Image (cartoon, helix red, strand yellow):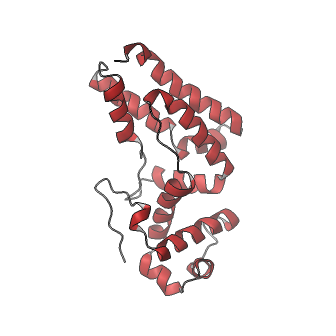
Amino acid sequence: MTIANSADGTVSDADLNRTQEAILSAYAELIEELGTDDVSFRLIARRAGVGERTVFRNYATRVDLLLATAAWIERSIFAREESPSVFDTPLAIREAMEAYDQRPELAHVVAETTMRGVSGAAPTPRKERLEAQLRAEVPAVAETDRRAIVAALSHIDSAATWVTLRRELGMNRRDIADAAAWAAEAVLDPIRGHVG
């Protein structure tokens, strides 16, 4: 069974049936317990309460399953309310970094899937929202500047940024949240005076 994607390539939870939801949830739990390498389709099926063939019917390959699970994790486990203003984005980013730190195995899965550019992954899921907010709140910003701001905020607001700060720089939870929020503030500071 193939899940129909929306125009932007994403799949919503409404597009998932109960069996698919159970499979993705089971795999996410097992990733936290065992990592991604040690999880067989048989183990996922047992945890989800379905037959192994059912897992294969819904997700023919491990890549299909991993991609669907990473998207589900981002939407379900790392779900968050949209910021009412682009200038609230730093606080949302701080909260996202803290959430990734609470579930590091799952944050790694989301980051690795989007960084590899696997078909269907959404590396910048909040891009359109940021663009719309900037157009509405700061219409005087030039298009090239708007694209640069959206690109910077989208990059900062990602599991990949959390992984980089944690793994490569060895930062702790609080320092990661502070650094990401400060970076977002630095991106937004030059346009604060242009709010229309």
In the rendered structure, the answer to whether residue 45 lies left or right of residue 174 reads left
The residue lying toward the viewer, choosing from 134 and 122, is 134
Splitting the image into 4 quarters, where does residue 183 fall? top right
In the rendered structure, the answer to whether residue 179 lies left or right of residue 147 reads right
- The answer to whether 177 is drawn above or below residue 58 in the figure is above
The location of residue 97, given as percent across then percent down, is: 60, 41
Q: Residue at x 70, y 39 (%)?
A: 173
Where does the C terminus fall, quadrant-wise? top left
Q: Residue furthest front?
A: 84
- The answer to whether 51 is drawn above or below residue 139 in the figure is below
Splitting the image into 4 quarters, where does residue 126 fall? top left
The residue lying toward the viewer, choosing from 47 and 38, is 47
Residue 171 in view in this figure: no
Q: Residue furthest top?
A: 193
Q: Residue at x 44, y 30 (%)?
A: 85
Q: Residue at x 31, y 53 (%)?
A: 8
The location of residue 88, given as percent across then percent down, is: 50, 30
The location of residue 153, given as percent across then percent down, is: 46, 33
Q: How many marks?
A: 0
- The answer to whether 22 is drawn above or below residue 78 in the figure is below
In the rendered structure, the answer to whether residue 168 lies left or right of residue 70 reads right
Q: Residue at x 51, y 28 (%)?
A: 184
- The answer to whether 127 is drawn above or below residue 114 in the figure is above
The location of residue 77, given as percent across then percent down, is: 57, 56
Where does the N terminus fall, quadrant-wise? bottom left
The residue lying toward the viewer, choosing from 51 and 117, is 51
Residue 81 in view in this figure: yes
The residue lying toward the viewer, choosing from 68 and 87, is 87
